[in-house]
Image: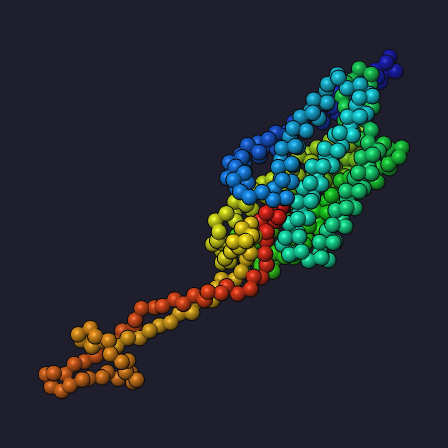
Amino acid sequence: MGGASDPNAAVISEVAELTTTFYVGVASFTVLVWDHLVTLSDEIEYVWKRKKSALIYLFFLNRYMTPLGFCVNLFAYFSSYFTPETCQHFVRYEGTMTLMGINVTALMMLLRIYAIYEGRKLVVALVAAVFLCELGVNAWLLSHGIAVRHSHNIHACTMIFDSTKVPGGVASASAWLPLLYDTVILILTLLKTYKHIRNASAGRIMRVVAKEGLVYYGVIFTITFILTFMILLAPDGLKNITAQTEYLLTVAMMSRITLHLKKQTHGGHDSDGLFVSTSEHAPGRVRFTRAPEVSITVQRLTHDDRGGVVDMPKTATPVAFGKGPARRDEWHELGPVHLDINASHGSAESGIDVDKATTM
């Protein structure tokens, strides 16, 4: 009797793992769809009606490919359509969609670093090297993806890495390598924005860039940290359970950051101390400069008792004209204050191309 109960226990365990995977997938997908709905009006206003760029097309690719593609994943969790043979092909699709979603976001981050560092070759080369390493390793891991083996009467299709070819420590690179890339992006972003914020010279956009980067990193770090240990320690049916959460929340947060930065720069000026200027030849180019120098000129006027303006006396003592009854006393007042604002704003300290740098 004890031997007969073991298969039933295995089936119950598999069903519980599949149910958990399904619930986590639905919850993550719900967050993504909800975020799309609440930000749709901003998307229409600040993206659809504006000039398109390479980054915006990447934004569209992630924002709409992801929910459509993930619907198939939800169908595969409990569908009887997938046999072991068809599932082996499907898991490559599942892994490819995750790889594309995460790395399209990574490419958008690379474009932002390129923008805020104004094409500095060494910085861009460093980020590009980490990006290519992460992409290459994950593509190689994907080539060793297999379907989770289930009992005969369990119909489901999810992916894990083949443990006979990819040890757990190597497989966990699918989680911590993207986190390493995000860490490099965060450090470079903070290095560029911290000095401005510390010196109280940063405007609204610079603060948004820093804040959004920290929030994004905090969320993704938490999920990726959990995913790394689950790949190492969890049973096969749960190893990649948070991979779908990482994928969907990465896309949702990147979309929100892109829209938030677009919205913040739409006004044409920054009310927090820095001017946002745009170029007629490059309307998407936003640069941050210190406030223009302002000189205040106080003009002192001298009036007689009839209201006429006379030459300002060279001494501080009252000046009288005439004698006796014909004597006229002068009175002095401060004239209007003139604000002379220099036409030149000086050289820009830093620049962000909104069409490229709406990342994080």
Would residue 207 be found to the left or right of residue 151 on screen? Answer: left
The quarter in which the N terminus is drawn is: top right
Q: Quadrant of residue 60?
A: top right
305 is higher (above) or lower (below) than 78: below
Residue 255 percent coordinates (x, y): 60, 39
131 is higher (above) or lower (below) than 21: below
Residue placed most toward the observer, 256 or 308 = 308
Q: Residue drawn 82% across and 37% down?
A: 141
Residue 37 percent coordinates (x, y): 55, 32
Residue 68 percent coordinates (x, y): 65, 28
Q: Residue drawn 59% across and 56% down?
A: 351
Q: Residue furthest front?
A: 281
Q: Is residue 148 visible?
A: no
Q: How is the image coloured?
A: rainbow
Q: Residue drawn 36% across and 68% down?
A: 338
Q: Residue drawn 30% across and 84% down?
A: 314
